[in-house]
C-alpha cells in the first residue's frame, strides 16, 4: 500500500476537539465534518482545495481527548490520505483503523516542512521526502491491517471476508 501527497504540519497535542470541534458534531457525515476539520487552529482548512490528497504530519499525542470517531472521519472526509505523528492516542489509533484512515508513528517529524511532497510505503515502512530525497522508516503495517485499510475500514473488511468465504 503506497500513498503520495503534500504535507501539512501540525504540532503536539492535537486533540479530537481541535480536529473537529464539538459544535459541529450534529452529523456523522464525513463530507459535512470535513468542512470543519481543524477549524479552530486553521480556520477554513477543511474547505481548502489543496487539502484533498494531502498528508498530515504532527507531533506527540495526536488524537487525544474524547473517543469520538468523528475526528478520523473528518480527516478522511477532507480527503487527507494519511496522518503521521510522533505518537497517537490509543483510541484515535483504533478509530482510524476502524474507518480505514492510514496512520503511522514517525519520530523525525522535524525533517519535513509544510508543502513537502512525500511517498509512504506501508508495506515496507519506507517514507521518502521528495524535497530532500531522504528516506525514513515507520513500522510497517502487518498484512491484516493493510487489508483493513485497503478495504476502507473494519466493517468493509468484514464484508469482503464474507464475500471471499462464499466463493
Image: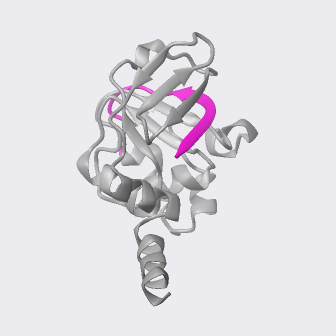
Residue 48 within the magenta-colored segment of the rendering: no
Looking at the image, the residue that sits furthest to the right is 49
Residue 6 to residue 63: above or below: above
Whole-percent x and y of residue 94?
Answer: 31, 56
Residue 14 to residue 79: above or below: above
Looking at the image, the residue that sits furthest to the top is 132
Residue 13 to residue 24: above or below: above
Q: Is residue 133 left or right of residue 159?
A: right
Looking at the image, the residue that sits furthest to the bottom is 166
Q: Is residue 46 left or right of residue 22?
A: right
Identify the residue at horizontal 50%, vertical 87% (top origin): 167
Q: Is residue 129 visible?
A: yes
Identify the residue at horizontal 57%, vertical 34% (top origin): 42
Q: Which residues are magenta?
A: 1-15
Whole-percent x and y of residue 162?
Answer: 43, 84
Whole-percent x and y of residue 125?
Answer: 41, 34
Q: Is residue 70 visible?
A: no
Residue 14 within the magenta-colored segment of the rendering: yes
Q: Is residue 84 left or right of residue 120?
A: left
Identify the residue at horizontal 62%, vertical 50% (top origin): 78
Looking at the image, the residue that sits furthest to the left is 90
Whole-percent x and y of residue 18?
Answer: 43, 42
Q: How many marks?
A: 0
87 or 128, nearer to the observer: 128
143 or 54, nearer to the observer: 143
Identify the residue at horizontal 58%, vertical 40% (top origin): 3
Amino acid at each position: 500500500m503506497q500513498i503520495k501527497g503534500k504535507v501539512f504540519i501540525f504540532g503536539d497535542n492535537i486533540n479530537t476537539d481541535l480536529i473537529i470541534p464539538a459544535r459541529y458534531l450534529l452529523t456523522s457525515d464525513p463530507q459535512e465534518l470535513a468542512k470543519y476539520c481543524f477549524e479552530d487552529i486553521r480556520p477554513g482548512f477543511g474547505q481548502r482545495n489543496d487539502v484533498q490528497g494531502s498528508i498530515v504530519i504532527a507531533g506527540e499525542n495526536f488524537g487525544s481527548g474524547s473517543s469520538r470517531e468523528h475526528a478520523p472521519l473528518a480527516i478522511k472526509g477532507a480527503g487527507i490520505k494519511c496522518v503521521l505523528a510522533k505518537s497517537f492516542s490509543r483510541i484515535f489509533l483504533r478509530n482510524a483503523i476502524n474507518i480505514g484512515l492510514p496512520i503511522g508513528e514517525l519520530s523525525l517529524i522535524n525533517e519535513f516542512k509544510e508543502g513537502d511532497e512525500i511517498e509512504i510505503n506501508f508495506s515496507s515502512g519506507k517514507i521518502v521526502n521528495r524535497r530532500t530525497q531522504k528516506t525514513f522508516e515507520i513500522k510497517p503495517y502487518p498484512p491484516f491491517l493493510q487489508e483493513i485499510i485497503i478495504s476502507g475500514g473494519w466493517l468493509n473488511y468484514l464484508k469482503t471476508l464474507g464475500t471471499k468465504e462464499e466463493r
